[in-house]
Image (cartoon, rainbow, N blue to C red):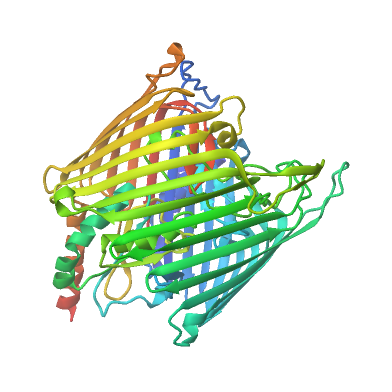
Amino acid sequence: MRRLLLCGLALCMGSAWGQLPGSVLGSLQLELRSYHRDSLIGAGELPQRIACNAYVPVTYRLGNVTLGFRYEAYLPPLQGYDPRYEGNGFPFRFVEYREGQLHVTLGSFYEQFGSGLLLRAYEERLLGIDNALDGIRVRYAMPGVRVTGLLGRQRRFFGWSGLVRGADLELALAEWGTGVPVDFTFGASVVSKYQRDDDPRFRLPENVLAYALRSEWRWNSWRLYAEWAYKHNDPSALNGFSYNPGTALYTAISGTLGSLGLTLQAKRVDNMAFYSDRTASGTVSVLNYLPPLSRQHTYRLATLYNYATQPGGEIGLSAELIVPVPERFGNGMLTLAYSRIHGLDTVHTDAFRYRSRFPGISPRLYLEELVLEHNAEWGETLKSTLELIRLNYNKDVAEGVRGYGYVHAWIAIAELVQRLSQQHSLRIELQHLWSRQDRGNWIFAAAEFALASRWSVSVWSEYNYGNPKRDERFAYPGAAFTLIHRTLRLSLGYGRQRAGIVCVGGVCRYMPAAHGLSLSLTSSF
Amino acid sequence: MVRVHLLALSVAAVTTLQAQERLPAVVLRALDGRPVHTDTLSNAGKPIVLNFWATWCKPCLLELATLHRLYPQWRAETGVRIIAISIDDARTSSRVAPFVRARRWEFEVYLDENSELRRALNITDIPHTVVLDGQGRIAWQHQSYSPGDEEQLADVLRRLVGSSSSGQ
């Protein structure tokens, strides 16, 4: 009866909201998963059997004012998420006021200065990242000048911790109408965090200041971006209580030569982990974002060995060339990408400091990756993707483990999407990974049949047939049925999921092996 | 149990609410670096299609290749303006301009590097399509892409153009 009353109340609320002046936007994401014991793949059983993550953000706008909140529930959190998320509440709520060039936010907000080397507050639900700030932010923008100032605490599960202060200034020359053919933008930002020193062993800085300078040059189709960041000494558990300052340098050049597209990126990072809480690690309380130079993969086997930036120290470059392919070879694109990342050469001068000369490239390779990808359209009904990846992956460094060394792997991927009729389509994916290290060879196959805008059914299996340990040659099959209606997507699946690292945007999280049912519901309005 | 009730309440509330929104005011970046204010986007009374995508999103690329093929025909028929909004973050946003220019996409492409517009619209996954009517109101939304979804989008655009011309 109580549930019926609550649902009735919700319906009334919904109808009443519909009559309000102003406008409402919202969405719902519900992820449910049952966990069954599967001792073969190491999947454990949850005492509650079922875990659930739910997110309901709603915003209401009336004139210049926007109110918003996000209800979140982890009952308990899905496996792989930090168990400290367990509970429910409204960890994100805000009120915004906009008047001309002024924009003021009170409450929770996300923000990024430059490319994020100093500050990037963002949300990535798949990884359980939400490092929103909660306080006050003021933005003022006029042609060619943008200023942001903020003060707040950082989200930590269902609470807030630390104290963060920051300011950013951006000057865009081209917007001043100078008529200069080269478009130049200059930016400067500063971030400071405060945390009380209550460590009995060390004298730790309570205020840590960090600043960054950036510039962007544009000329015809070409763009050059460079950002340099410096962080004063910030000893923490994560950097072994090093009193060294932190630095980061990131540059990117991109443009087109005729019909060729070219992107070059280089980055050097030294002791640049930046957290609002010096006891934190992983993705909790992190203040900045260090864009990785490895390629962002989405195919299943290509994500088996995923690399994320090592904030302690690394130096690397990446290059990508995109070449249009003539019609007789599939009227598509050929992409050639290469990344190489090394450790930094450092010499310890005492227990808490080290010397690191620029550029200081260590012979210790962290990652080398070569990718060749061919996308093609064969008429209006058949599309294909072929991808070949050569990988040299330092598993010890990338995953923080010991004794595994390097994994040398080749990965071949083929994806075909065939339109069978106006509404029906079939997608086939075949992948193979060859390696003599770690867990050896893998094969993956998937098929998906879809009726456009209505439903799809998919089956897949991943098989570690080449595992050197014969009794660990497991298959990870699964199937899912998905219903789609406009913004509503309801998916019901069943299967095994291998343990591994899941990465989005170069930030990674470990997902344990699992076996069971999954239900996913997303909708927005 | 109270927590489960709260969750059920939220689900019921969300499923009963109706969209009645104009595009939130957010500043995006064009590929040439110029700021684009979303609250000033217009198309002379014709519909606008906003397609949220990223360079690493395979279904997004399938959908955009199809929109690229159909754009000249749709533009002639309905006057639609298509805008592809990339949510590539700092890791891949440098790739976007050469990626787009090599493909010769004719529609506009803007960058939403820290997902401000995506979040303001409460978009969960990509690809996600938002259609604005001639008055700039959100008229239709759709998430995910399978070949053939574009037929439904074309119907929506024709209906919007038909209703606006019959209303004039």
A68 w.r.t. A197: above or below: below
Q: Which quadrant does the C terminus of chain A fall into?
A: bottom left
Judge by depth and name the residue closer to the eye, A285 or A409: A409
Q: Residue at x 44, y 43 (%)?
A: A30
Q: Outermost residue toward the top?
A: A471
The answer, for residue A150, to whether it is visible in the render is: no
Q: Residue at x 76, y 51 (%)?
A: A244
Res. A193 image quadrant: bottom right
Which x, y percent locates residue A352? Answer: 81, 44
Res. B134 image quadrant: bottom left
Which x, y percent locates residue A258? Answer: 29, 65
A472 w.r.t. A190: above or below: above
Q: Is B88 positioned to the left or the right of A88 in the image?
A: left
A233 w.r.t. A217: above or below: above
Judge by depth and name the residue closer to the eye, A10 or A40: A40
Judge by depth and name the residue closer to the eye, A136 or B3: A136
Which x, y percent locates residue B10? Answer: 47, 49
Q: Is B70 positioned to the left or the right of A414 in the image?
A: left
The answer, for residue A274, to whether it is visible in the render is: yes
Which x, y percent locates residue A171? Answer: 56, 77
Res. B150 image quadrant: bottom left
Q: Is A515 positioned to the left or the right of A118 in the image?
A: left
Q: Is A99 positioned to the left or the right of B151 in the image?
A: right
Judge by depth and name the residue closer to the eye, B147 or A403: A403
